[in-house]
Image: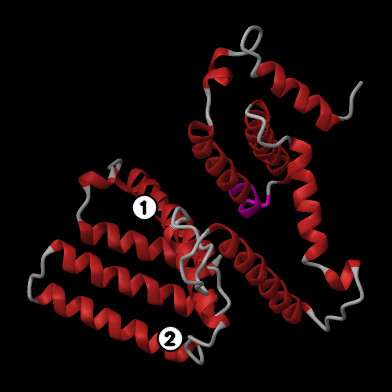
Amino acid sequence: MPEPIHRLLDIMALLRDPERGCPWDVEQTFATIAPHTIEEAYEVADAIERDDLDALKDELGDLLLQVVFHAQMAGELGAFRFDDVVEAICDKLIRRHPHVFGDTKIDDAAAQTRAWEQQKALERKAKAAAASSTPESALDGVLSALPALTRALKLQKRAALVGFDWPDAHSAFAKMAEESGELAAEMDIGADHDRLEDELGDLLFTCVNVARKLDVTPETALRRANAKFERRFREIEVLLAEDSGRKPADATLDEMEALWQRAKASERSG
């Protein structure tokens, strides 16, 4: 029996075979598969958040399939194959860890992070020089297709590397308060949708800055907040059903707020 990875590659090749394969798999392109790739990455993150290792095993397999799928399509075009993907990441890991695979000395994890970013910056500079005549920027390579929270964090980290940064979390928090006040002022004068969206975007961007200065990943923080909201709202539904056989749509806002506080207190005491 072939090694597991070779078995997977053979299965994917058969699925893509124009004559013997699966019609759905055959008609896919990089563009149609990309959303599935993103979704699978989020499902990996969800399994980790739930501390479900059985699910993580399955989700990692699904994510690996996405890599194999893209590599198979690229191979059909003569662009690259799965082995090339593996070689590229192996070379990159060795290049970015000279303290492990070479003679460079790095004192701690923080120093390694700085060295990693410096190496990535050199790689981006080389790519930019080869591919474009546009002026070099510290923000080169931060993809516009990233989720907004993730992109905001990356942009801020890049700017911080060249000294454009708040000195501490309190300074970033003060800016967040300032942006909040500006949004409130626009709301008070009945500003149009575009203006409100602009001010809200500034506020969200500064929230990411505060998170970064506190060494909190904003995506993780928001996912936790989402989970907390869902958990407490579901408790409202349960309490309403138990107390009076009603649903939220049948209750007043004051009633639901009281039950929210009840659910909140129950969580904290538990």
Q: Residues within 10 Å of mark 2 (few under 14, many from 20)?
A: many
Q: Residues within 10 Å of mark 1 (few under 14, many from 20)?
A: many
Q: Earlier in the sequence, mark 1 or mark 2?
A: 2
Name the quarter where the C terminus is drawn: bottom right
Q: Nearer the viewer, residue 105 or 152?
A: 105
- In the rendered picture of this protein, how many numbered marks are placed on residues? 2
Q: Which residues are magenta?
A: 46-51
Q: CA distance from mark 1 to mark 2?
A: 35 Å
Q: Is 94 on the left-hand or right-hand side of 40?
A: right
- Going by the numbered disc 2, the residue's amino acid type is Ala
Q: What is the x, y in percent for residue 100?
A: 89, 69
Look at the magenta stretch and give its main secondary structure.
helix
Rendering quarter of residue 257: bottom left
| Residue 209 - label | none
- Going by the numbered disc 1, the residue's amino acid type is Ile
Q: Is 214 on the left-hand or right-hand side of 60?
A: left
Q: Nearer the viewer, residue 128 or 215?
A: 128
> Which SS class for mark 1?
helix
Q: Is 210 on the left-hand or right-hand side of 10?
A: left
Q: What is the x, y in percent for residue 211?
A: 49, 75
Name the quarter where the N terminus is drawn: top right
Asked if the stretch drawn in magenta spans residue 2, the answer is: no
Residue at the spot 23% in from the left edge and 65% down from the top edge: 197
Q: Which residue has dot 1 on it? A: 236
Is 180 situated above or below 171? Answer: above
Q: Nearer the viewer, residue 74 or 116?
A: 74
Q: What is the x, y in percent for residue 219?
A: 50, 62
Residue at the spot 48% in from the left edge and 55% down from the top edge: 146
Is 110 situated above or below 239? Answer: below
Q: What is the x, y in percent for residue 40?
A: 58, 41
Is 244 situated above or below 258? Answer: above
Q: Which residue has dot 2 on it? A: 172
